[in-house]
Image: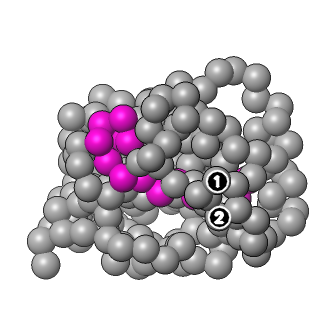
Amino acid sequence: MVVIGDTRIVRAVSEQDRIRWDQRYRGETAGIEPGLPPRFAAFQDWFPVEGRALDLACGRGSAAVWLAMRGMEVLGVDVSPVAIEDAIALADEAGVADRCRFLVHDLDGGLPEGPSVAVLICHLFRDDRLDRAMLDRLAPGGLLAIAVLSEAGSGRGRFRASPDELRQTWSGLDIVADGDHGGVAWLIGRRLSD
């Protein structure tokens, strides 16, 4: 394990995945701005302003930092150390480094340990083996915002959702909004109280 500031980097990451994502993030030259992914932005008022949040496959930290700027305590995880370093820098620049922790973590090994959260964001990452753990991590009344590659307008694939798959998978949530177009399926839902 390597530590950068208060951030742990766990070396259980698949080397091939890490290299591929590191190369992709090194190739991105556009600046990073805090904010929700575009599919969720129209629903920003649904996102809480306090409590804990978990951002899975957080990339360069835009959503995690945006949540922290709203007042949340956020853990962002990604397989890429390059992305995590960018996320740490963004949190520092935004003045919310004290409310953001970032962890290099291979989600193939499951979710990182931690308490329940009021918000769980998972943008363009899909592993149905994590569905139960994600639901369990979400506090009663908590908000899930998930977007995955879709078979709609695309071909089939291991990580692509079939039509209505998200709605079926997350049927126990009170679904706020969902859609499936442009090769991406997405859903925002609130966990009902136990």
Left or right: residue 30 versus residue 132 is right
Q: Secondary structure at mark 1?
A: loop
Quadrant where the image shows the N terminus: bottom right
- Residue on which the image places disc 1: 5
- Residue type at numbered disc 2: Arg
The residue sitting at the top extreme is 30
Which residue corresponds to the image point at 36% horizontal and 31% vertical from the top-left?
A: 41
* Residue 58 percent coordinates (x, y): 56, 49
> What's the magenta region?
67-80
Q: Residue 174 vs residue 167: left or right?
A: left
- Of residues 88 and 82, the one drawn nearer to the viewer in this rendering: 88
Q: What residue is shown with label 2? A: 8
Instruction: Check if residue 76 falls in the magenta segment.
Output: yes
Whether residue 69 is visible here, answered yes or no, is yes
- The picture places residue 146, in percent across and down from the top left corner, at 42, 52
Real-space Cα separation, disc 1 to disc 2, in angstroms: 8 Å
Q: Residue at the spot x=46%, y=32% of the render?
A: 95
Labels 1 and 2 touching (C-beta < 8 A)? no
Q: Mark 1 is on which residue type?
A: Gly
Corner quadrant of residue 77: bottom right
Image: 111 above or below 89: below
Residue 48 image point, x, y percent? 22, 46
Q: Residue at point 29% right, 42% down?
A: 71
Q: Quadrant of residue 89?
A: top right
Residue 108 placement: quadrant: bottom right
